[in-house]
Image (cartoon, rainbow, N blue to C red):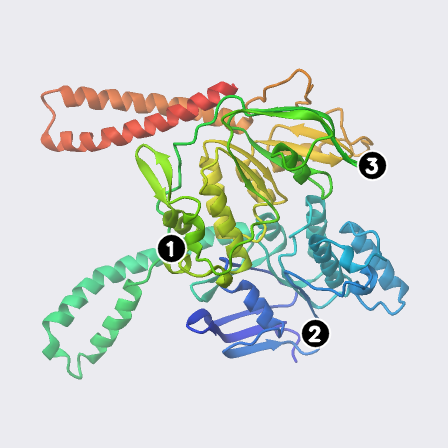
Amino acid sequence: MAKDTPYLDVQHLTKSFGSLVLFEDINFSVAEGQHVGLIAKNGTGKSTLLSILTGHEGYDSGDIIYRRDIRIGMLEQSPTFDPEESVLDACFNHQGDPEKVLKAKQILTKLKIRDLTQPMGQLSGGQQKRVALANVLITEPDFLILDEPTNHLDLEMIEWLEGFLQRGNKTLLMVTHDRFFLDRVCSLILELDDRTIYTYRGNYSYYLEKRQERIDNKRAEIMRANNLYRTELEWMRRMPQARGHKAKYREDAFYELERVAKQRIEERQVRLKSRNVYIGSKIFECQYVSKAFDEHVILKDFYYNFSRFEKMGIVGNNGTGKSTFIKMLLGQVPVDSGHFDIGDTVNFGYFSQEGLQFDEQQKVIDVIKDIAEYIDMGGGKHFAASQLLQYFLFTPEQQHNYIYKLSGGERRKLYLCTVLMRNPNFLVLDEPTNDLDIVTLQILEEYLQDFPGCVIVVSHDRYFMDKIVDHLLVFEGDGVIKDFPGNYTQYRQWQSLQPKDASSKTSQNAPEKKDYHNDTRRRMSYKEKMEFERLTKEIEQLEAEQRQIEEALCGSTTSVDEITAMSKRLPVLKEELDEKSLRWLELSEIA
């Protein structure tokens, strides 16, 4: 077989479950040395497609052609092992090869798996996923197929894996929600959408740009088809007698036109903004809290005063105590000493790593309605349970599905909806991006950007953190916590400027180093300063426009058409002015 033959060539592939068609007549290929990312919404068939490609699942029709004699390595989303096997035996049959054993130890150490004799049954699910990843990398296959490779990796491991995959001429196809990872590792994006495959020859940033162009072009095509459809529909109604042999081509064209005109592009017309969330000025004060598990120190005499409307990110390696910290805040884990003093108005909404156990026989919509029928959005507006589900991309049909039919990502998304339906004013999100598709992550980012309460996010998703947080607590281990005023990228940029030979984890040059005993307020971040200045100018412009309209409406020279237009504009202007003024006041309290 020729050298330039693709490693993988998929031709006219179709897969369905009963009446549900996941994809139909799709075609794509992966060439030697290509790094390909596969993107799709939860439940549309990403993991099914990977299972088909590796022979674990059948398909309806089509051809899957691999280059002869290549070795394929597959990382499954939920790998299984013999619980009695040791870590090293579970990795690969090294057959006493000292070079392979050495490589195994090096990769496992990078992935924080250090006891190679430990039985697999004693490892957590996240540790088992890391062993499975190590196994794939150690065996050095020609073609890597990876399903969510960054799940259960901390930031240090993710950055190491990025570098590992970028080196050499590796060929890989991966499903991942980690957009930083896609941007840095992948040079070609495949999007599975509307039962077909779209190819974008670039990284994630390129994909975003070209995908929007595709959607805009599709929208324009549908609009043109709708305009022509009305004309042709009139012809079909008026001239049934004209449909002889010569007009048959026009009739056939009409039905194709009808198919295009009736297509729908899934769009969310509005962002979900609640104005009925109130939270007082006192949020919580972490008063000299200490916590340790035997010799493992999580916090040591730690003080922090959380500010109103703060959006904080918590980052750090696995095992440094991030999840323990928020569980102590929520009262789920006792402190050894110290105290969390929480404000009376605080209403927590907690999204945990562990998720939620659902009744498999319950319908999706009933899960949400059991919590509440609607959310009071303020201003006389309500958001019904079905609207919240539709906002997070549960179609009306899916809302009446039973839980047992949902994919893992869809269950995770439903769990998120159960948290938000309680209308909390303080969201605590522990690894919220795990198993959520990229479209859902974009929706969640918009929601959190507009959220009028407080947010704490524990996440290894750098892209997500940069979008949401303006302040970090960096857990460095052994009770050392660094307080950084900025997002993750800004932190990494600052970190890269520090002396390489700094031996202490607590660098003396850290910005805004806090004296926890005295400093009880956070400062306005750079992003908030820019927003405050922009709002000041916009409010002045809106107030000036409001005065002009009110003066014109009181005058005698304004025409009827002008009065009508101004009367429509005035309530919209006032609503916009109220919203911006409220945010300006919130920011002024920090300044």
Residue 548 x %, y % = 22, 21
Q: Which mark is residue 266?
A: 1
Compared to residue 68, the image places residue 20 above or below, namely above
Q: Which mark is residue 295?
A: 3
Residue occupying the far top of the picture: 518
Q: Quadrant of residue 550?
A: top left
Kind of residue sitting beneath label 1: Glu
Are the residues at dot 2 and dot 3 in contact (C-beta closer than 8 Å)?
Answer: no
Badge 2 is on which residue?
70
Q: Secondary structure at mark 3?
A: loop
Mark 1 vs mark 2, foreground winner is 1
Residue occupying the point 84% across, 53% down? 115
Residue nearest the observer in this picture, 385 or 484 = 385
Residue 113 x %, y % = 79, 52
Kind of residue sitting beneath label 2: Ile
Q: Secondary structure at mark 1?
A: loop
Kind of residue sitting beneath label 3: Glu
N-terminal label among 3 and 1: 1
Residue 54 x %, y % = 63, 72
